[in-house]
Image (cartoon, helix red, strand yellow):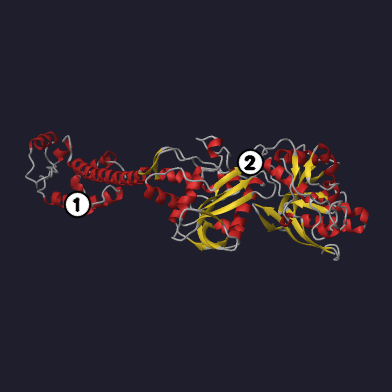
Amino acid sequence: KRSTNQMLPDLEEESIRSVSVTDFMNNAIQSEQFTDLESVKQDLESVKQAPAPPEPDTDSDPETDSEDQDSSQPESLPSGHLSVDETAEKDDEPWTKRILTRKCLRWLAVGVISLLILDAVLLSIFLTEGGRDSVVIAYVPETICLDWIPGGGKSALCSASDTALGGEVPNLLAKAIKAASAEGVDLSLIPAGLAHRDIRQGEFTEEDARAVVEDSGGLRRERKRQLTDGGVSLVSLRATGLQIRQILTQSLEAAFEEGYDASYPYSAGLRFTVDASSQHNKLGTLELEAADGTWLPTDENQEYSVITTQDWASQYLQASGTMTEITPLSALLKYAGETKSLTKPTFSTLEFTESKTDRGFNGVINVPKAICLEWLPGQGVSNICSREETSAQGGGVANVVAWTVLEYLHAESHDIDMFLLDAADCQVDIASGTFDEQDFQLLLPYNHELVFLIVTGEQLTNTLEQAIHYALLSPQNHGSYPYAGGLRFEVKASESLGDRVSNVQYHTRGRWKEVIPEREYTLGTTLPLADGEKGYDDLHYPVSRIESPDLKIRDVFQKFVTQRGIIEDVPLTKYSTQSFVV
C-alpha cells in the first residue's frame, strides 16, 4: 500500500467539485488505499449532501471575485466535515487529508495492536516451551558418570577409574527402562550407545534428559554406524538364559573385537563378569536378581521376560518381540519425575578384567590347552592331534592366528571386515604350557607383510574356490588351503570347481551375515596372496588396493598375544571351515 502522503498530491490536484462520488470511489479503489469502502462511501455521501458553495460569476472582475471568495463563509455542514468551498484549498489541513489521515491512523492502530497480540502469543508459546524444558524434575546429589566400555574415558566429568566397572549413566538408563516396563519384566538389556552425556550434580530438567539420550554426532563417528537415540523403539520378549548369554557374548565381541564401544551391554536385573583380555570367552558368570533381591545364576533352559532394543532383538536373536510405547527418553523422564532424586545406580558389570596386568601377567604367555596344527582338513600334519580331530573343520592354529590379527587390526582402528591367510603360514602346533620368543618364530617363520584390499563378494567366493581347488590338486599344495578370521564357509571337496564352496558368511557386530556377491568388502591378507600366488589368482585383481600400514603377520600376532598374556583356541563356530565333506 502507498502511504497517505504519497497519494495526497494526486487527490489534491483535482477540484472536489468536479469529482463525483462515483469517480472518487473509483479513484480510491484504483489507488488501493481503502479497505473499508462502506465507511468511505458514507463520508463522501455526507459531503455530497452538504449545501454547495455559490457559483462563481464569470463576468465579474477576477480581483473582486477573489476578495468575495476570501470573505465568504461556508454554510453549516454535517458534524465532522469541512467545507468544500474553494477556500478550503488554502486551509492548512484540507478535508481530504483529514479523512485520509483518520483512515490511515485507524488501520495503523489496528495493525499495531494485531502485531502486539501476535508477539504476545508467540512469546507465550516460547516461554511455555522453554519453561517446560527448564522445569526441574529431579535433583542429582552427585555427578553420574558416562562411559561405554569400562574405563573407556568417554566421560567429560569423571576419570577412567570412576568408570572401572562401566558407565553409571547407561546403568541408570537400563534401570529407568526396567522401572517403566510392565510388571513382571525380569530384566532390561541395552547397548551403551543409548547414553551420550554425563548427568551433572544439581538440578535435573527435561532439557538435561534429552541431552543424555539424544546424540549430537558423537555416536555416528563410531565406525560410522548408526545405532540408536532417544527415540529408539524398545521391545519386550521371552528369552532363555542361553539366549541372554548369546546376546551378551555377541555384543561383547562387537565391543572388543571390532572396537565398537557403543555395543557394550548394560542391564538392570542382571549382572555379569567380563574378561576383555580373554581371546574368545569374554563373558563369565551370569546372575539374575530374584524378587527378594538375592542374586541367582541364570538357568540356560528357563525363559525370562526381557525388554531390549528392537535392533538387538532382531540382530542377536532374529526375533521381533512385542513393540512397547517406551523410549529411553520417556523412561528417564518418568523415572526422574517419580523418584525426584537421581542417584548412582548399581553396576551390571560385576567384575571387569581388561589387560595382562589385571590377570597378574608376569611376562610368561600361557597356553591353557594345546591347539592343533592342520593344513587341509584331515591331512594329519599335527604332532599332537589325530586326523579325526581335524577332519571336519581343519586345525585351530591358523584360525587362532587369523582371528588374533583381525582383532589387533580392529583395536588399531583399521576398518577390516576379514583377514585371510593360507595354512602354510603356520608351521607348528601350539602346545599347552608357556609360549616364548622362539615359539613365535617357529610358528610364523615367514613374517609376511600385510596388505589391505577392496574385493567384491563374488571375488571373495571365487578366491576360496580357486584356493581350495589348488590345495586339492596334490599333497604338495595342501598348505594353500585357506583359513580366515571373520569369514566362514562350508566345503564339499568332491564337487567340481565353482561348486565346492557354499554358505559364505562374514562376522560383523557380533553376528554372522551372508556375503553378498555385489557388495564390496575390505580384506586383510598377506603379500604373497595379494600378488595372486598359491592359487589366489583373483586377489591379484581387486577392486582396489588400499595403502597398507607397515605391519607383518608375526609381529602383529606376537604383540597382541603378549599384551594378553594368553593364547586360547577359538570356538568352533568361529572356525573358517564350518564343514569339510570329502
Q: Residue at x 57, y 59 (%)?
A: 313
Where in the figure is residue 203, as x and y percent of width and height?
A: 38, 40
Q: CA distance from mark 1 to mark 2?
A: 87 Å
Residue identifier under label 2: 354
Q: Quadrant of residue 356?
A: top right
Three-letter amino acid code at the position of disc 1: Ser
Where in the figure is residue 299, as x and y percent of width and height?
A: 58, 60
Three-letter amino acid code at the position of disc 2: Glu
Residue 231 falls left or right of residue 462: left
Where in the figure is residue 476, as x and y percent of width and height?
A: 93, 53
Q: Are marks 1 and 2 in contact (CB under 8 Å)?
A: no
- Asked if residue 253 shows in the view, the reply is yes
Where in the figure is residue 336, as x and y percent of width and height?
A: 40, 47
Secondary structure beneath disc 2? loop
Which residue is nearer to you in this view: 374 or 460?
A: 374
Which residue is nearer to you in this view: 43 or 88?
A: 43
Q: Earlier in the sequence, mark 1 or mark 2?
A: 1
Residue 55 falls left or right of residue 455: left
Question: Would you call the spot at circle 2 few (<14 residues within 10 Å), some (14-19), or many (20 or more)?
Answer: some
Residue identifier under label 1: 39
Question: Would you call the spot at circle 1 few (<14 residues within 10 Å), some (14-19), or many (20 or more)?
Answer: few
- Asked if residue 518 shows in the view, the reply is no
Which residue is nearer to you in this view: 500 or 57?
A: 500
